[in-house]
Image (cartoon, rainbow, N blue to C red):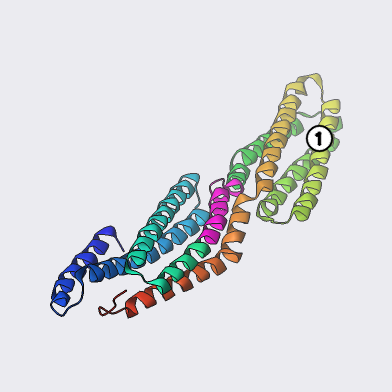
Amino acid sequence: MSSRSALCLVALGAVLGTAAGCRGVPNPLFTQLSEARALAADLHVQFVKAADASDRAVMAETDEESVAFAREAERATQAVGGDITALGTRLQAIGFQTEASLLQEFSARFADYQKLDHGVLGLAVENTNLKAQRLSFGPVQEAANAFRDSLDAVAHAASAKNSCRTEALVARAELAVREIQVLQAPHIAEPDDAAMAHLEAEMSQRETSAADATTTLAGLAEPKMKPTVGAAVAALARFKELSGQLIALSRRNTNVRSLALALRQKPALMAACETSLAALESALAKETFSATR
């Protein structure tokens, strides 16, 4: 519920309170009850907004979207805090102990939710898995292609006596690099540290294979081929450097971890908060104008 809607409800309550006053019901009490109901409704709306924005931050596909949704969630969370304080004041003024207890129950449950959600949002905005994925599809792919092109140039420039061996070494080096690229995708998606370590070991073996093949090619190369082989060595070094950056990002696993928290732990905390809010709104709805507390 918007602030404007809440004010409309309060105004309506004041009008009805005037009529009720003719029947002996205190106007201030009615007005405060109307305000309490409006605040409880807005509290529920803001809580739902905070949870929804947090989920969108987790699922966002860009850094900009993640940050924007995280800020939206934080604003709604602050609004929840403001509503809790204002509603507590109203309930204390009216003397509604049952509703005050329900609000305290929600506040405690919301604190647990907020603690978890703070961690979820902190992970979500880092986007390390998405960054690793973009690195894999962009600069890593470009470096792998540059390595391939350099090796192909080496193969075409090889002398007749070394052509067969050169082609075999080129194929070995290219295959090793492409296999590393294939292993990067499951590494980015993998949540388990041991499984990631196993994938890294396989990547390391293939890096060694590519490096050994390239070193052997350098030994076979005729003087005119040295610059071409040098380009291949540089491209492989660039590929290894970028692959190391990718693994470091993937190891952070912030997208995987934030999604796991959002799917496994957050729903139970949300449900507990929703239960308290529903009970609070129900209790306020049952209060009558004849209440004199």
Q: Is residue 160 visible?
A: no
Graded by Cα atoms within 10 Å as few (under 14), some (14 to 19) or many (20 or more), the crowding at tag 1 reads some
Q: Is residue 181 visible?
A: yes
Residue 163 point in image, percent of width and height: 82, 34
Q: Give left or right: position of 214 versus 244.
A: right
Residue furthest to the front: 293
Q: In this figure, what is the number of numbered marks?
A: 1
Q: Give left or right: position of 282 versus 199.
A: left
Q: Nearer the viewer, residue 44 or 236?
A: 44
Residue 17 point in image, percent of width and height: 18, 72
What span is in magenta? 111-130
Residue to which mark 1 is pinned: 211
Q: Main secondary structure of the magenta part?
A: helix
Residue 186 point in image, percent of width and height: 69, 54
Q: Is the N terminus in the top left, top right, bottom left or bottom right quadrant?
A: bottom left
Q: Residue at 38% across / 55% down in the picture?
A: 82
Q: Give left or right: position of 144 versus 170.
A: left
Q: Is the C terminus in the top left, top right, bottom left or bottom right quadrant?
A: bottom left
Q: Nearer the viewer, residue 37 or 31?
A: 31
Q: Amino acid at mark 1?
A: Ala
Q: Residue at 60% across / 47% down in the picture?
A: 133
**In this rendering, is residue 260 above or below 212?**
below
